[in-house]
Image (tube, rainbow, N blue to C red):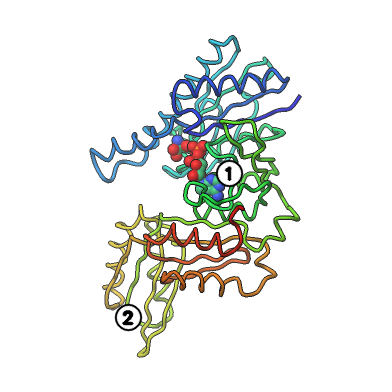
Amino acid sequence: MSLIVQKYGGTSVGDMVRIQNVARRVIKTYEAGHKVVVVLSAMAGVTDHLIQMAEVITDRPNRREMDMLMATGEQQTVALMAIALESMGYKSRSLLGFQANIRTDEHRMSAKIQHIDAKPIMDLLAQNTIVIIAGFQGVDAMGNITTLGRGGSDTSAVAIAAAIKADVCEIFTDVDGVYTADPGIVPKARKLKCVTHDVMLEMSGLGAKVLQIRSVEFAKKFDVPVHVRSSFNEEEGTMIVGEDRDMEKMVVAGVTFKKDDARVTITKVPDQPGIAARIFSAVAEIGVSVDMIIQNTRAEHLTDITFTVPKTDYDRTMEVVQQVAGKIGAQSVLGDKDIAKVSITGVGMKTNHGVAAKMFSILAQEGINIMMISTSEIRISCVVEEKYAELATRCLHTAFGLDKE
Ligand code: ADP
Ligand code: ASP
Ligand code: MG
């Protein structure tokens, strides 16, 4: 007998037929003698629809109330799943985040899970009940409902698996596993049998939305075995593992792109100590996190500073940066929302030279201009014009030998 957490994503519970199919799959696991905790997302499109409704009223909705609103999507699916299981003759109980004691910090719309009380879940399991928990939500110390950021049900599932010491956390989704690139964009992408935590962390952070990055952080920290697989077939998917010899041989294991960021440039900034600190403190004060930063030195003790921020924070950032630019005597502030970050990730990069040069040449051959570059030991990212994101991803995938035969 194993203790298994199964998370089903939005497409997997996208309509009533699919919800009943998931119920049958859960029952199959239960009948095989396992204890099962099911974590669910909202039906595909529901979270987007909830956000759009608020945006009809205002473009800056109250963030506490957005949590309240967005959390309702998962309330529907957990209740429907419990109804389906009961109609099939099985004992189950649905729980919202607060009922399962999923405690988070107060960060609205992207709260972090701090603690999960295993006892209420274990008590129900001991009574042979199938426990169904709403993903994506928790409760803060003041009793407010919080949500974990888009794609957060993955994190709920892995955190719950860690708390109850599950034998495995299965992430059921609409693809068969983790691929070398988004299979919807790169038809020649290959499924990976295993992906290491570190590579998956990079890929998730750089656009592979198949797993939310925080779920991978939990998996790594608490050593939770995670199996990403399809809810539409029985095939083995991808295991997320601590280390893997085969993967370590791959120079590039995956190509990803992300269109969520915007670029801000402040031109002719006085080249003096403390100036960068003033700019980035002002941005930090409004709670915006900066990703890439570059500084180009000009003649005459002037520099240009360019950085990226989430598109959703672009307007707020521009307002603040324009104020600071005025005070420090910079020339102008330019912004660009039409950018994308294209990245290659692989453990083998540590020991292979010329990977960056090859990436830049491939982009150049396609006539794609690189605006910014950043690297880590196992990743290289280039900011390019948004319209080239998919093309760049496909070309890099081919050039680094990842296409399937
Ligand atoms: P769910 O609703 O099940 O959580 P998501 O839409 O959040 O599903 O994530 C699955 C999607 O992630 C896939 O349909 C695929 O288009 C996308 N994706 C992006 N990069 C990858 C990748 N490297 N491997 C697999 N899927 C990826
Ligand atoms: N329903 C939430 C979202 O769409 C959480 C999730 O699906 O993981 O972002
Ligand atoms: Mg998801």
Name of the residue lying farthest toward the bottom: 300
Numbered circle sitting on residue 268: 2
Residue at the location (38% across, 81% down)? Answer: 303
Name of the residue lying farthest toward the front: 405
Residue type at mark 1: give it. Answer: Ser
Residue at the location (62% across, 57% down)? Answer: 253
Viewer-closest of 187 and 343? 187
Q: Is residue 7 visible?
A: yes
Quadrant position of the N terminus in the picture: top right
Residue type at mark 2: give it. Answer: Lys
In the rendered structure, the answer to whether residue 309 lies left or right of residue 199 reads left
Q: Check disc 2: other Cα within 10 Å, few if <14, some if 14-19, many if 20+.
A: many
From what the image shows, is residue 276 above or below residue 161?
Answer: below
Residue at the location (65% across, 66% down)? Answer: 349
Q: Gap in Å between the C-alphas at discs 2 and 1?
A: 41 Å
Disc 1 within 8 angstroms of ligand 3 (CB): no
Q: Who comes first in sequence, dot 2 or dot 1?
A: 1
The x, y position of residue 317, in whole percent, is 33, 60
The answer to which quarter of the image holds residue 51 is: top left
The answer to which quarter of the image holds residue 107 is: top left
Q: Nearer the viewer, mark 2 or mark 1?
A: 1
Secondary structure of the residue carrying numbered label 1: helix
Residue at the location (47% across, 69% down)? Answer: 363
Name of the residue lying farthest toward the left: 57
Q: Which residue is mark 1?
A: 215
Secondary structure of the residue carrying numbered label 2: strand
